[in-house]
Amino acid sequence: MVLGGKSLSLAGYFREYGKRIRAGDLGALPIILGLLVIATIFQTLNQNYLTPRNFVNLILQMAGITTIAIGVVYVLLLGEIDLSISYVSAVAAVFMTMRLRPPDGWPWFVALIAALIFAAAIGFVQGLIITRFKLPSFVVTLAGFLIWNGVVLILIGNGGTVIIQDPVIIGIANYFLPALWGWIVVVGGAILFAANRVMSWNTRRRRGIASTPALVVALQGLAIILAAVVVVSIANQDRGVPFVGILLLILLVGFTFLAERTPFGRYVYAIGGNAEAARRAGIQVQRIRVLVFMISSFMAGMGGVILASRLRSVDTAAGGGSLMLNSIAAAVIGGTSLFGGSGRVISAFLGALVIASVENGMGLLGLSAGVKFVVTGLVLLLAVLVDAISRRGRARSGVA
Amino acid sequence: MAQEPLLQLKGVSKSFGAVQALYRVDFAAYRGEVMALVGDNGAGKSTLIKGVAGIYPFDEGEVYFDGQPVQIHNPREASALGIEVVYQDLALADNLDVVANMFLGREMIQKPWRLDEAAMERKALETLDSLAVTTIRSVRQPVAELSGGQRQSIAVAKAVMWNSKLVILDEPTAALGVAQTRQVLDLVRRLADNGLAVVLISHNLHDIFEVADRITVLRLGQNVKEFIAADTTHEEVVHAITAGALRHVPGMVKNG
Ligand SMILES: Nc1ncnc2c1ncn2[C@@H]1O[C@H](COP(=O)(O)OP(=O)(O)OP(=O)(O)O)[C@@H](O)[C@H]1O
Ligand SMILES: [Mg+2]
């Protein structure tokens, strides 16, 4: 009889877990340890690091790159790359801002939706070129990187800045929920999320195929609610829960669902694991590829809007600096493989959290941009090393 | 036997650049029978079945299924007709678990777009149990963690899970141990006895004589002969594989 996963005993569950860890299947463990180390170091160096104010700042700082990195995760899952994301994000932001400009500006939602559709259309064209002409995504999106950089400069004009005046668009990254609403939305959401998990666990159990012990499911649910309570109480000591934090959660949950619970997501993983097997299974590989490049551009556009909202303007520097490299690094630091088929949407969040924590901490210490780059680079290197070493552990113990 | 074949190929050819992999090959598979397809390495066996499976098109020739002329452009159309293939190069996604692989491209759906994991897991377990595949620890482990034989069993189980009419197996026992080979051969026989048409490619004549009703021999991309298994011998088949008469002399074929 093959083990479908009848309910394990609690001891059995932890024995399995311990076995996986020893075999090198570390999951999110290294990154959580890493975050603890980062927090300890910066807190000892500067007492302002672990404060409610800085906590809220961190959420605001990581929102844009997390959003872009979610799209990157999908592209990496396919085993492809998208270098155009940073300037696609800038183009979307510029497009939206210019459409908002009085006197004949569009209503905010029309400008926003048009900008996001425009971004997705860029991904459609790039994806189509990559799949139709069998070109490496590296080259096509590198061309995109240059082209969209140029378009941003042309649209804005030399040294110009376009100010955003629309209060709703500014609110995306600058609005904070009143204390009570913070409690209702975040803790309420966490309770719904936990309840949903318990319910789907229960369905599995009734159909005779649950694998997690009841106690573990209950503890996980409580941990989620507890985390929500902690987050809200800290945020409410400062300005409150930022709206963009809620937006981020919705995006993370939605894109995780898409990746892990729908046929589309299953096909993305299958193509990244073995494209020929996917083709023979009747999956329309090229169509999925194009859709993924559209997701990548769409999320880049969304991230661009968030970044512009935070600055309340766009200028010729939009999309520049280390935005593209940081977004890709976030997905990789979070544990998504560059070789396709392995990774999770949540890695966008974890990686962005690491990058933002380091940048934020070094900002507080007043370190130069040079030092920031060096440290972020070392963190990236460390992350891929940990992954490679743990993968070797897995190969040795015969679990890969 | 005068019955009409379920699958019939008439004069199919396929070339890869300068390599003429198949030249005007005729082939048939019958309901309730195991048709063995044999030939040396590179004879064109895998090419023949990939054409049937819609992996690539034949250059010329006709394909009939259930008496109807058909064009199979892609794997989806093949499975819609009821054709399932176990490929020599297994075609499993290593990063996905056993259940995900068995249902790849044909997932069960719940509500609007959600995968029905529970139902898929149950059906996968049932299928594996019915095939007496007992060595797999969990159907939730990635296929990468399985042994060659276990992967082979999964590929076979994947092909027979659907209510198919024609099951094609390309060297399904090549990587298997004694006990698992036994199981696959029993399974092949059982499928045919249940009325399916089965095409079995193998280099092991012993296995073939055990389960096959007919044997088609390919040599250098051409038909050599079709035998009734009960009316022939190992020696005859071996002779056909290695030295069977070719209808078209190599070098005189028009391709080039
Ligand atoms: N995709 C391809 N591209 C180019 N040539 C190919 C391709 N597939 C097969 N061939 C060639 O076609 C011929 C027949 O190959 P095929 O794989 O059908 O042989 P086979 O009978 O299955 O052999 P084996 O017993 O080794 O599996 C060989 O000469 C092979 O090199
Ligand atoms: Mg072959």
Image (cartoon, coloured by chain):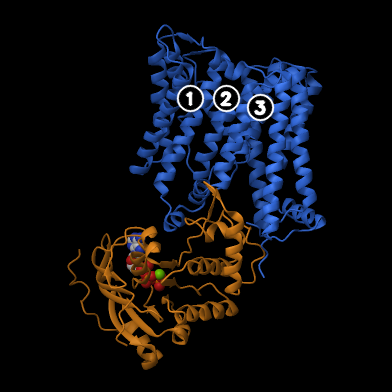
Chain colours: A blue, B orange
Judging depth in this view, the residue of B72 and A278 nearest the camera is B72
Badge 1 local density, few (<14 within 10 Å), some, or many (20+)?
A: many
Q: Chain of mark 1?
A: A
Residue at the spot 43% in from the left edge and 53% down from the top edge: A283
Asked if residue A24 can be seen in this view, the reply is no
Residue A375 marker: 3
Question: Looking at the rendering, in which quadrant would you find the C terminus of chain A?
Answer: bottom right
Residue at the spot 45% in from the left edge and 67% down from the top edge: B88
Labels 2 and 1 touching (C-beta < 8 A) = yes
Badge 2 local density, few (<14 within 10 Å), some, or many (20+)?
A: many
Query: What amino acid does circle 3 point to?
Result: Val
Question: Looking at the rendering, in which quadrant would you find the N terminus of chain A?
Answer: bottom right
Labels 3 and 2 touching (C-beta < 8 A) = no
Residue A369 marker: none
Q: Tell me the distance, in whole angstroms, between the alpha carbons under discs 3 and 1.
A: 25 Å
Q: Could you say whether the residue bearing mark 1 is in a helix, strand or loop?
A: helix
Q: Could you say whether the residue bearing mark 2 is in a helix, strand or loop?
A: helix
| Position in image of residue A346 (x %, y %) | 63, 38
Residue A64 marker: 2
**Figure check: B34 above or below A179:** below
| Position in image of residue B70 (x %, y %) | 28, 65
Single out the mark in the foreground, 3 or 2: 2
